[in-house]
Image: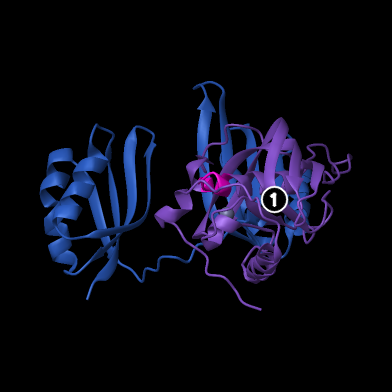
Amino acid sequence: MSLLEILTYPDPRLKTISAPVTEFDAKLQAFLIDLENTMRAGPGGVGIAAPQVGCFQRIVLLDVSSKPKIKHHGNLVLINPEITQWEGFEIGREGCMSVPDYTGNVIRAQYLHLMAQDQHGIQHEYDMEGFEARAIQHELDHLDGLLFIDRLVSRRHDLFRRKVYVSIQTQPHLSSEKAIDR
Amino acid sequence: MSQWYMLTLVGKDQLGIVAKVTTALYKGGCNLGEASMLRLGGNFTIMLMVSYEGDNKQLYDLLKEVVRELNLHLHIDVIEGHLHQHRDPEVRITVHGADRAGIVAQVTSVLTEAGLNILDLESDVGGNTNNPFYIMHIEGIATQGIAQLSQALQQLLATQHPDLKVQLEPIETLVM
Ligand SMILES: [Zn+2]
């Protein structure tokens, strides 16, 4: 197994727009294994895009299953992914293996519909939400030469209300609101 | 060898403070680190990490002219500074209510006791002179878990400030 080298900002190659994958051959399968090992070895381990390792093809791996209590599709190989519908927006904090030691708030769509091919070239469709939807939007940006730092919103002033987790009740006899299950 | 300094500059807000201060530092061979600069109550405040080869006195001399021209208060401390050591907040707490003495002290005291390590706190007074309201955002690390913080806040509200509005939410950072 080999780990691939991650390009880090301000490396200009991260601005490259990646090309569609056309060959679903053995070379691709071998690359996917290395890419997954590289993702798993990283600090977040929930997603990686091929251009992050200097391969400018439209390939994304995603696996947000380690996050508790969320909807997700498990371990995904997403080739030539395309978002066909968006809905809602949500602010959330993101970091990136290609942008070490910095995290920031980014607005992303809450729900989306995605079309993508798998490692064999078979087309699939997914309805995604929450963390998984956020992750694919972050990775799709990599394919288009964008980083989350291109989309930051102020840390100091929230432009949009976040999802409220606990509203501390003002009346002592009322029990506290339950955490929103995501 | 260069040394990290923490510069504190405060003065009446006016056009060009940041540009003039940072230009003087740049021309004097300083490198800037992390900084916080904002307007507070009509004043402009700067907290700025500066890496510099000279000593305290030489650094002061670099800024002497700008400080005089803009009528700023300048304070310089030698610090042990480190870059690339950010810590990500785990929780965000918003508090607002009618302004009164002691909100910050009481809220932060119970949060500290419940294990909150504050990374960032900003607060403001809104409304008008007759009906001021206080609003505060805190981000930090919940060293004893988020449930502890929530419990501590509930306790505070139940016993002392039934009219305060308090919200608490985890900040989950997705690294991809
Ligand atoms: Zn990334």
Q: Residue at x 78, y 62 (%)?
A: A66
Mark 1: amino acid: Ile
A178 displayed left or right of B145: right
- The numbered mark 1 sits on a residue in which chain? A
Q: Quadrant of ligand 1?
A: bottom right
Report if residue A118 is visible in the image: yes
Residue A121 sits above or below residue B130 on the image = below
Residue B165 is situated, as x and y percent measured from the top left of the image, at 70, 36
Question: Split into 4 quadrants, where in the image is the C terminus of chain B?
Answer: bottom right
Q: Quadrant of the N terminus of chain B?
A: bottom left
Q: Is residue B18 left or right of residue A182?
A: left
Residue at 48 percent of width and 62 percent of height: A7
Q: How is the image coloured?
A: by chain
Q: Residue drawn at (23%, 36%), measured in percent from left and top?
A: B16
Specify the segment rendered in magenta: A141-148
Query: Where is residue B157, by image quadrant?
Result: top right
The blue-tinted chain is: B
Q: Quadrant of residue A67?
A: bottom right
Question: Callout 1: few (<14), some (14-19), or many (20+) C-alpha neighbours within 10 Å?
Answer: many
Camera-nearest residue between A171 and B34: B34
Instruction: Please identify which colour was used for chain A in the image.
Output: purple
Residue A44 image position (x, y, % from top left): 65, 62
Q: Residue at x 14, y 58 (%)?
A: B28
Instruction: Based on the picture, tell me whether residue B161 belongs to the magenta stretch.
Output: no
Cβ of mark 1 under 8 Å from ligand 1: the answer is: no
Determine whether, in the image, residue B45 is placed left or right of residue A4: left
- Mark 1 — residue? A79
In the image, A1 versus B4, the foreground residue is: A1
The front one of A87 and A91 is: A87
Does any portion of residue B106 appear in the rendered image? no
Q: Secondary structure at mark 1?
A: strand
